[in-house]
Image (cartoon, rainbow, N blue to C red):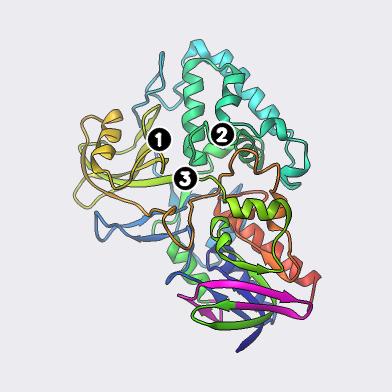
């Protein structure tokens, strides 16, 4: 039986950073990952429709101003970056008076649009992103984004633009998404709606795998293909059951697994209270990111509207002279295996497009993740938010799903790894 100072569960960005940095303090660390690769929901690989082209089927974008920890990791390992694809051709379907332009709100809606954005930002200013959404009396905002937008009485194009943006960002239809989670995202980006939109600023052209592989090389003991089944702790340490009838003991354990995968872990003593309820329920994110290879579409295309894809935009050139587009929707609105439905969704905006093929990773069906980026069900965040990441005896929690400042972002994963380092230092064995 192995025995170490720290056992880390999950080799996404949070687990990699926690394992590496804890090792650098002189502690012995083992990092266990259920999958046969590192990176978690940051996943770059060869395109299935255009072999030889590296694509991101998970998270990828960042902004140096807002996402300083990720920028520091990129610089530490000298990972190449470049600006995200620029969008110069617009095909929007946002309702009456729409404009196929970068700022599609018509002049006649400008005053009302300003009023709506002012109220949205004002509500975001009620949030202290570091305090936890369950601790601030925000229950009146933890309602469906649909009901929230209806109350704002936005004019039609502005209303559809906000609905499309929320659908894209939350990975849920506006009827299912929490308005409070939308506002939390605005608060974290400097209380700015544009801050959220413009955070899709920079990418790694060789894939996030270049960075996660570099980080993994600095972890002394990384074990892939080793799913963890349970964690039992007492006053002296934590016993971790993993793999096939294997056991590891540690003074501390760090669970850096996605929230929806945590329901498959046995905790002894068990988690309690609202945190236990939310872990059992799982968050409601159903986001689906499709990489659609097309012919006959100009570079720089960007589409926003009321179609099955709330957003559809240019991503990369393909080797056949066409383009690879990114289409966002949710798993309930589109079956990613339904080629005909995908073609109809593309043609809603781009009737001239010839769809060559579709690539994606179904995070909802992935047994080690069970959901894409975090998006709480209505009412969850005001029951458990900060508490999701709080220490449970000798067990610590990390990962973008339990981030306070940037949940759902790589930056959020790194943020929680830093918190774990502070916790372990404050509670030595």
Crowd band around label 2 with a 10 angstrom C-alpha radius: few (<14), some (14–19), many (20+): few
Q: Quadrant of the C terminus?
A: bottom right
Q: Which residue is mark 3?
A: 286
Q: Which region of the structure is painted magenta?
A: 218-240
Q: Which residue is mark 2?
A: 194
Instruction: Give SS at disc 3.
Output: loop
Q: Residue at x 45, y 75 (%)?
A: 225
Residue 318, given in percent of the width and then of the height, sits at 25, 50
**Residue 148 placement: quadrant:** top right
Q: Is residue 78 magenta?
A: no
Q: Calculate the distance from the C-alpha at mark 3 to the C-alpha at mark 1.
A: 15 Å
Residue 310, given in percent of the width and then of the height, sits at: 41, 33
> Observer-nearest residue: 308 or 302?
308
The disc label shown at residue 258, or none: none
As drawn, the residue found furthest toward the top would be 108
Residues at circles 1 and 2 in contact by the CB criterion of under 8 Å:
no
Is tag 3's residue or tag 1's residue first in the polypeptide sequence? Answer: 3
- Mark 1 vs mark 2: give the one in front: 1
Between residues 414 and 321, which one lies in front from this camera angle?
Answer: 414
Residue at 64 percent across and 73 percent down: it is: 231
Q: Give the side of residue 78 with respect to residue 399, left or right.
A: left
Which mark, by number, is residue 311? 1
Sequence-first disc among 1 and 2:
2
Task: Give how far across and how far down residue 174 sits, in percent.
Answer: 51, 32
Q: Nearer the viewer, residue 157 or 234?
A: 234
Q: Residue furthest bottom?
A: 1
* Element assignment for label 2: helix
């Amino acid at each position: 039986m192995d025995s170490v100072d720290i056992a880390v569960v999950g080799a996404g960005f949070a687990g990699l950073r926690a394992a590496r940095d804890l090792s650098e303090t002189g502690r012995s660390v083992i990092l266990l990952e259920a999958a046969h690769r590192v990176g978690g929901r940051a996943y770059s690989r060869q395109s299935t429709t255009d072999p030889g082209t590296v694509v991101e089927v998970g998270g990828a974008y960042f902004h140096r101003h807002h996402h300083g920890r990720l920028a520091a990791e990129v610089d530490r390992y000298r990972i190449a970056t470049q600006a995200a694809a620029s969008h110069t051709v617009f095909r929007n379907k946002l309702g009456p008076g729409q404009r196929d332009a970068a700022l599609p709100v018509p002049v006649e809606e400008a005053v009302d649009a300003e009023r709506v954005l002012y109220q949205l930002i004002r509500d975001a200013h009620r949030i202290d992103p570091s305090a936890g959404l369950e601790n601030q009396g925000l229950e009146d905002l933890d309602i469906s984004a649909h009901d929230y937008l209806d109350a704002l009485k936005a004019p039609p194009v502005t209303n559809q633009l906000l609905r499309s943006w929320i659908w894209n960002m939350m990975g849920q239809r506006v009827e299912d998404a929490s308005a409070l989670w939308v506002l939390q995202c605005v608060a974290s980006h400097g209380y700015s709606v544009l801050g959220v939109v413009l955070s899709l600023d920079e990418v790694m052209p060789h894939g996030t795998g270049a960075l996660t592989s570099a980080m993994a090389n600095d972890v002394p003991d990384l074990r892939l293909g080793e799913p963890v089944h349970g964690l039992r702790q007492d006053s002296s340490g934590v016993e971790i059951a993993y793999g096939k009838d294997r056991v590891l003991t540690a003074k501390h354990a760090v669970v850096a697994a996605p929230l929806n995968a945590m329901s498959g872990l046995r905790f002894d003593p068990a988690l309690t209270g609202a945190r236990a309820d939310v872990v059992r329920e799982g968050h409601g994110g159903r986001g689906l990111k499709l990489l659609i290879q097309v012919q006959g579409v100009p570079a720089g295309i960007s589409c926003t509207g009321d179609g099955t894809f709330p957003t559809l935009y240019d991503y990369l050139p393909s080797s056949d002279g066409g383009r690879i587009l990114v289409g966002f929707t949710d798993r309930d609105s589109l079956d990613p295996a339904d080629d005909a439905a995908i073609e109809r969704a593309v043609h809603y905006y781009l009737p001239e497009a010839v769809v060559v093929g579709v690539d994606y990773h179904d995070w909802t069906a992935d047994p080690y993740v069970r959901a894409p980026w975090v998006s709480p069900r209505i009412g969850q965040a005001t029951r458990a938010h900060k508490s999701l990441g709080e220490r449970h005896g000798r067990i610590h929690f990390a990962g973008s799903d339990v981030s306070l400042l940037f949940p759902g972002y790589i930056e959020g994963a790194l943020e929680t790894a830093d918190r774990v380092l502070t916790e372990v230092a404050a509670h030595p064995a």
